Image (spheres, rainbow, N blue to C red):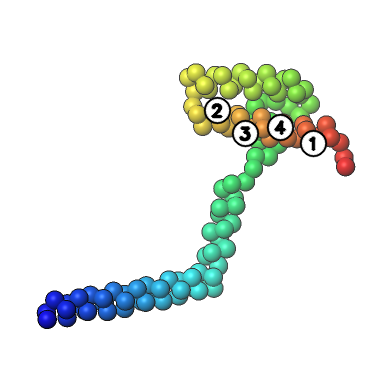
Amino acid sequence: MAARILANLIVIGSGVMARAFVQAYRQALANASRSGAAQEAVQTIKRASKTMTESEARQILGVAENSSWQDILQKYDTLFERNATNGSFYLQSKVHRAKECLESIEQMKAQGPS
């Protein structure tokens, strides 16, 4: 008899706790949307994942705006290999992203205005 009462108390108590948790979660979402915290979090995520600009890519590779594609590739190969042997993976990935950025710009220039 005591085991049945204890089991009922546990089931009822967990149900009450679950409903309270759901209600608190809904209230937290409502508060976040009213205060703008949700939009701020989205903006932070967008800022963190922004793509590299052309000027940043040129600065990383150390090339000027009038540099040829061959010069860019030569700088890329040099910097990438240097960081592959005794550099950092972070710098190596930055060099690679810079090349990708400039490559996409070169492709858009090659296609011309549409």
**x then y, percent, for residue 92:** 55, 27
Q: Which element type, helix, strand or loop, lies under badge 4?
A: helix
Which of these two is toward me, 24 or 51? 24
Which of these two is toward me, 82 or 11? 11
In the image: residue 95, left or right of residue 18: right
**x then y, percent, for residue 94:** 58, 32
Residue 30 lies, with reference to residue 111, above or below; the image says below
Q: Which mark is residue 93?
A: none
Q: Circle 2: is it few (<14), some (14-19), or many (20+) Cα within 10 Å? A: some
- Residue identifier under label 4: 102
- Residue identifier under label 1: 108
Q: Circle 3: is it few (<14), some (14-19), or many (20+) Cα within 10 Å? A: some
Three-letter amino acid code at disc 1?
A: Met
> Do the CB atoms of the residues marked 1 and 4 lie less than 8 Å apart?
no
**On the image, which quarter does residue 78 sit in?**
top right
- Residue identifier under label 3: 97
> Which of pointers 1 and 2 indicates the residue nearer the eye?
1
Of pointers 1 and 2, the one earlier in the residue sequence: 2
Disc 1/disc 2 C-alpha distance (Å): 25 Å
Q: Residue at x 84, y 35 (%)?
A: 111
- Residue identifier under label 2: 92
